[in-house]
Image (tube, rainbow, N blue to C red):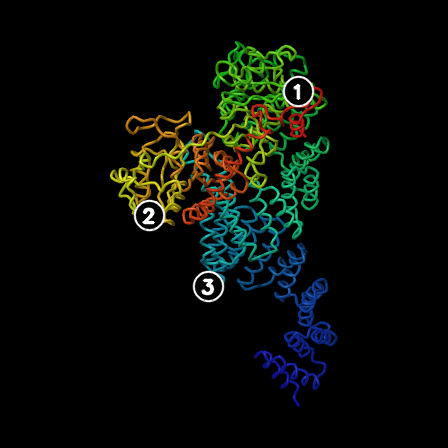
Amino acid sequence: SNAHAWHGLANTQAALGDHAKAVLSFRKALRLKPNDEVAQVNLGNSLKSLGEIDKAANAYQNAVRLAPDYGPAYYNLAGLRQVQGRPDAAVELYQETIRLQPTLPEAYFALGKLCHAESRMHEAILAYQSVLQLDLPNHLRAQANVKGAEVLAREGREAEAMAMLDAAVSAAPDFPAPFAARAAVAIQQGDYATAARGFNQALSLATDPEQQRHFRLQATIAAAQAHMEAGRPGAAIKLYEELLAEHPRNPQLHLALGTACSTAAAQLSSASPGEGEVSSAARAEHAAREERLFERATEAFQFALKLQPNHAPTYRNIGRLLRAQREYNGALAAFKRAVKLVPDAASWFDMGIAHYEVGDLAESIACYRRSLALQPHDVRAHANLGSMLHEAGEHEAARSSFRLAAQLDPSNEQVLLNWGHTFRDTDQPRAAQQLYMRARQVAPDNMQVLQALWQSRVTLYQWQGRESAASQVRQMLYGRGADGSHGNISGTGVSLSAAVALPLRMSELLLIRRHFARHAAVGSPQTRRRAQTWPWQEAGPGPDPASTEMHVGFLVAAGSPPPPRIASASTRVYCYSFERGPLPASVQDASHGAPLSSQPRRLKRREFKSVCDVLVDALQQPVQSLAELIAVQHRLQVLVDLSMEPSAAILQLLALRPAPVQVLNGQKGALSLGNPLIAQYILTTRALLPPSMASSFTEKPVWLGVPCGQPAPPPRVAPLPVERLGLVASGPAPARRRADTDRAAGSAQGAVPGPGAGGLLAGGLPGALVAGLLGTVGPDPVTWDVWMAVLRACPHAVLWLVHVPAAALSPLRDEAMARGVAPHRIVTSPWTTLGAFPSSSPHESLLDGEEPPSLPAMLAHADFALSPPGSSAAAGGGDAAGTEEVRQALLAGLPVLTLAADRPASRGPFSETTALGAGLALQMAASTFREYESKAIGLAKKGDELKALRAQIQQSHSDECIEKSSEECSTPQVPHSWSSPSKTQDGPWCLACRLLLS
């Protein structure tokens, strides 16, 4: 009957967690004393714990009605309104609580936290600053400073936030939260090294195990990000892998690891060494590391998606990875998925890049505008939008975008440079020059800026009628000297006094000249990775878009097929000879032996009936001058390289991009230039390059009926008698299934007998005899690792290094032993020449003075062959001998495993296999190192599969011979699809050129 007793019992029951009994006791107390506001509040607390929110709210409201100045009633009702999703009402109740109980710190903290969550930053900061005016214990004072600093940091007021955190450290030096908050502010400022130190300080002060684990995780992540910011993704990868060992199911760690691997792969790709810069082995190792990083990034992103399927940043990073691998359509699909999940500014920005890369300029512009609507101060989005609008011809809109970008970032020289281009391309050289000069002030050593500035001055001189000054500057920069000699790297080509008389900087001139000469050559990373704007592309007249006449040029050299006969009045044909001595016979015959001169010569059709209008001896002038001749005077629209093995001069010319459309001749065995800056298109057939494999090429295929100059298949060669094969082992001969008296002579000298024409299928050896086709180069580390892995998986297989001399077996044997392969399983032959291949080195030895046998006759004894994946993946121009070996092996009916990758020398061997048909190419081509190894092991183990594959190759040769003898290919020197039906209309070749231009 005592209300106080029931109230005390209820409090005890609530403290023990028995809220159901506590509610009954509170109600008995209230029946005895109905006006007890404290009992009403406590009843509300127990009802809230039971989840009876509405009843709890009634209890709190009863307390407020009974005692309008009772602060705890307002405080608890405010918390309940938060649970009910009514933040505005909660804020008002917390403010009323503070008015009634101004010394209650909990009310200030609750109000600050709620306002922070609701983005009411001013009120949140005011709440934390107000609580600091109270007489607080040190730990609460430190906590208030930390919370206030978090709000200030979110507002971008980092300096004020750091001041509050310093006060927190002074109040409670052993409190870990201020140090962790300092680290968070440092991350916001992009200072990850400072952030890592802050988290480590917090870790040293934390006592709770869970808190320690959290701080350790954050410290390591910050350290990894510091490595990323410093351009050391490899160090970041190691840290992320250590964290994943402890947190294997953390999706953010997998995402960060994938990003680090992708960045590291992009770094390797941009720094890829060119031909002649390092050894082929180093290039192969470089390419293998790049591919491993891309594969690791893919695995990490896939696992992150498995753990967090609808995470937009993961899709965004997958898109960036695919874009780095030039899988543009896949990247676009990933970005679309990210936008669908979270349509934020970053996703729209990335999708704008993807749309541009697939050629959709209008969609790219729309995406950038959507990104800017969400984040209007993004300099990159303004700059990219300006570039897209400029390319679309909307110059005024482009200038507006560049102007905004320059206002946001006045020190961005690329923005100023591109802004200047909008005036340059609309014949306003003075305005362009002013912007180029602003860009030079920001970046005085930027090559693009200096070259644009000098070229704008050339254009301005031309506008002013000062042709002499313009000519001198052009000669100094790119052309011949005043004395007619070609300007060298260290000189200027004209007198120093003449240059000083012009308002130009001689130091800039020399800098540009050195840069131009260094990077014009093919193989430099800058030339391989991005298009270079050359002077003739800036100021030269170029093709006239209003003209109906087409200008087409052909590069011919020794062994080139003849240019096609284009009988069209609207097409002018130019021919550039790179053969020393007389003009190639095919061109001489077509032009009735017309002589060449160092100057372009107009040939009359009615007199010579030639295939071309102008013949030029390309070897009589420097490459840069020839490029300017092609671009400025001849105004070529399409330039086709017909050379079978492009020389260094041809490659340098193509790298200078003198024509807007450059095309490679896709003859079998010539698909070995993996440089999109050299050519955008490749003329081929569906037999040589099946559509299913087109994604392995950077050039876009243009499929014609018959490729230019397609040679007839060489004659078949009978297998070499096995006693002449003479395979020399580097150790004891492997065990044989049966004694073969025909091979006794070879066996007596430690030779390993070949398995016969059928190889394993004939039962000669317990395992496969695998031919390694190395061409004229030795095995690189990547190739050797893969081949040794195949031998380890197939313990009875023998590797025959076809053209490795016996003297070179000793180091290879050591390398094989180091990889767990017995030395006697590495064999060679005394015949170390390529036989019919004309550019091979002389053979080392002859048996009894005999001539070396042909390669197909030797290879007929192997089971299958391996084209090296390492050098094939990384060699700059490709080993022509390796391509010829593949051709000869296929002629012998031997399956050849190749790596069909978007890299230079893999394309020659790959094109040889695709010439046999798409089905065979898919069986004999791998797209990754892992697939290559797996297919090689499969071929070495499966005799029936080998037998069927060899039969298909033999049948393909028969079909090829039938096709070559058909009426369609009766004139292989002049393919019918390149001819015109009459001289008054364009033929298929002209239509193909116009298609390329469109």
On screen, residue 1 versus residue 519, left or right, reads: right
Please determine whether, in this image, residue 102 is positioned above or below residue 398: below
Front disc: 3 or 2: 2
Q: Which residue is mark 3?
A: 207
Front disc: 2 or 1: 1
Amino acid, disc 2: Gly
Counting other residues with Cα less than 10 Å from the Cα at mark 2, is it few (<14), some (14-19), or many (20 or more)? Answer: few
Give the x, y percent position of residue 326: 57, 40
Q: Which residue is mark 2?
A: 820
- Quarter placement of the C terminus: top right
- Quarter placement of the N terminus: bottom right
Q: Are marks 3 and 2 in contact (CB under 8 Å)?
A: no
First along the sequence among labels 3 and 2: 3
What secondary structure is marked by label 1? loop
What secondary structure is marked by label 3? loop
On screen, residue 369 versus residue 205, left or right, reads: right
First along the sequence among labels 1 and 3: 3
Most foreground residue, 469 or 593: 593
First along the sequence among labels 2 and 1: 1
Amino acid, disc 1: Ala
